[in-house]
Image: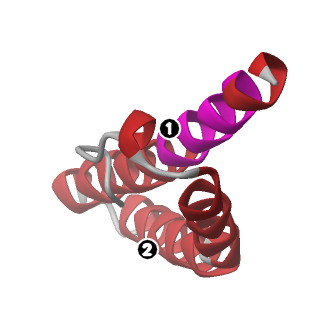
């Protein structure tokens, strides 16, 4: 998701494009996290501890990574907008 990118070096147009790209991935990220949580619930019902924990951890990492990337881009946009 580009968490290693330096958004301070990008132009405002590039930041806005990045924000739109991240927002367009929102539905796919939600579907993926939902699917993984469904698998975790299914595994829990079947008594499988390891797959349940793994799916919960992967869901958290995916959702958290998406949220951090979007927040970073939006904060840089906000910082630049306030400076003008």
Q: Nearer the viewer, residue 13 or 20?
A: 13
The kind of secondary structure the magenta stretch mainly shows is: helix
Side of 42 where 6 appears, left or right = left
Q: Is residue 75 above or below residue 7?
A: above
Task: Where is residue 69? Give x, y as percent.
Answer: 48, 46
Task: Where is residue 28? Give x, y as percent.
Answer: 59, 81
Q: Which residues are magenta?
A: 68-79
Quadrant location, the C terminus: top right
Query: Residue 68, labelled with which disc?
Result: 1
Task: Where is residue 51? Give x, y as percent.
Answer: 23, 62
Q: Is residue 17 above or below residue 74?
A: below
Crowding at dot 2, Cα within 10 Å, few <14 / some 14-19 / many 20+, comes out as: some
The quadrant holding residue 39 is: bottom left
Side of 73 where 53 appears, left or right = left
Q: Is residue 80 above or below residue 30?
A: above
Quadrant location, the N terminus: bottom left
Q: Is residue 26 magenta?
A: no
Query: Residue 21, labelled with which disc?
Result: none
Numbered disc in front, either 2 or 1: 1
The quadrant holding residue 67 is: top right
Q: Is residue 7 above or below residue 41?
A: above
Q: Nearer the viewer, residue 41 or 32?
A: 32
Residue at the (68%, 78%) spot, across then down: 24
Residue at the (43%, 34%) spot, across then down: 8
Q: Nearer the viewer, residue 26 or 7?
A: 7
Query: Residue 39, labelled with which disc?
Result: 2
- Which SS class for mark 2? helix
Q: Is residue 76 magenta?
A: yes
- Which SS class for mark 1? helix
Compute the Cα span from label 2 to label 1.
Answer: 24 Å
Task: Where is residue 17? Give x, y as percent.
Answer: 62, 69
Crowding at dot 1, Cα within 10 Å, few <14 / some 14-19 / many 20+, comes out as: few
């Amino acid at each position: 998701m580009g968490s290693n990118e330096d958004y301070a070096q990008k132009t405002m147009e590039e930041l806005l494009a990045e924000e739109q790209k991240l927002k367009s991935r929102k539905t796919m990220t939600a579907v993926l996290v939902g699917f993984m949580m469904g698998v975790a619930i299914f595994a829990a019902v079947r008594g499988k501890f390891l797959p349940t924990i793994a799916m919960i951890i992967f869901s958290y990492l995916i959702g958290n990574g998406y949220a951090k990337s979007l927040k970073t881009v939006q904060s840089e946009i906000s910082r630049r907008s306030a400076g003008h």
